[in-house]
Amino acid sequence: QVQLVESGGGLVKPGGSLRLSCAGSGFTFSDYYMSWIRQAPGKGLECISYISSSSGTIYYADSVKGRFTISRDNAKNSLNLQMNSLRAEDTAVYYCARDYYDSSGPSSDWYFDLWGRGTLVTVSS
Amino acid sequence: DIQMTQSPSSLSASVGDRVTITCRASQSISSYLKWYQQKPGKAPKVLIYAASSLQSGVPSRFSGSGSGTDFTLTISSLQPEDFATYYCQQSYTRRSFGQGTKLEIK
């Protein structure tokens, strides 16, 4: 079925590294922009990074720029997030999401139409 | 970066009530505005995109309006399953979310 499944979360010490992965299935992964969105405990949603279908366009939020690297492997239907120099404030559930462009109606728009269940990253000593 | 501000931050209402949540962008975002619903422990689900287009499968009691900087999400008659947190999100420039509105049972 159409789904996204994240993996790689866990407990890491401040300053450490972690690599998250997201496996897509049931759709043509290479057709879509993909994003990482995180949610700190009890807080709101933050889109921290996205990558275009061909990896030609990449965005990072200021909060992770220079520390996180997004990548994708369309042959393996996978999205990755390499997280270095982790801080306590990076503690969150990390979701991968498909960024869908809908031009079918009177107004076009991009929206996150498919989400994974999330993986928890805890940064603590 | 475009800042999205929702109001109220929390709201208590009863089943059957009509509820409106507002979202204001720090600059014009045309109609590049989405509304998501999130229940505890679950990923968000898109309800409305392009400010007023209802996502397939979403009940018609949900509606969205607005353009430019001011937007609203309206639930015409609250059902028990609607008690959740709602987020607006813009995609005019990059991607950013509002801080959320928690809708609770009165």
Image: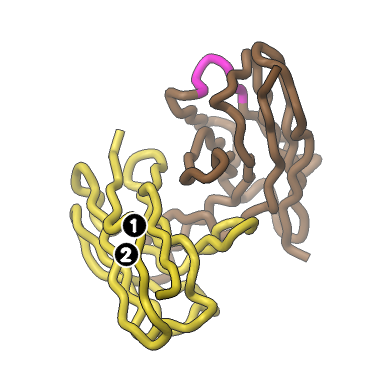
Chain colours: A brown, B yellow
Residue at 78 percent of width and 40 percent of height? A7
Q: Position of residue A96 (x, y in %)?
A: 63, 45
User: What amino acid does circle 1 point to?
Assistant: Leu
Q: Residues within 10 Å of mark 2 (few under 14, many from 20)?
A: many
Residue at 51 percent of width and 81 percent of height? B80
Q: Are marks 1 and 2 in contact (CB under 8 Å)?
A: yes
Q: Which residues are magenta?
A: A64-69
Q: Position of residue B67 (x, y in %)?
A: 21, 61
Residue at 58 percent of width and 27 percent of height? A90
Dot 2 corresponds to which residue? B51
Which chain is disc 2 placed on? B
Q: CA distance from mark 1 to mark 2?
A: 5 Å
Outermost residue toward the front in this view = B106
Count numbered badges in the picture: 2
In the picture shown, does residue B82 fall above or below A109? below
Dividing the picture into quadrants, the one containing residue A51 is top right
SS for callout 2: loop
Dot 1 corresponds to which residue? B33
In the picture shown, does residue A94 fall above or below B40? above
User: What amino acid does circle 2 point to?
Assistant: Ala
Dividing the picture into quadrants, the one containing residue B45 is bottom right
* Quadrant where the C terminus of chain B is found in the figure: bottom left
Which chain is disc 1 placed on? B
The mark nearer the N terminus, 1 or 2, is 1
Chief secondary structure of the magenta portion? loop
Q: Position of residue A61 (x, y in %)?
A: 45, 28
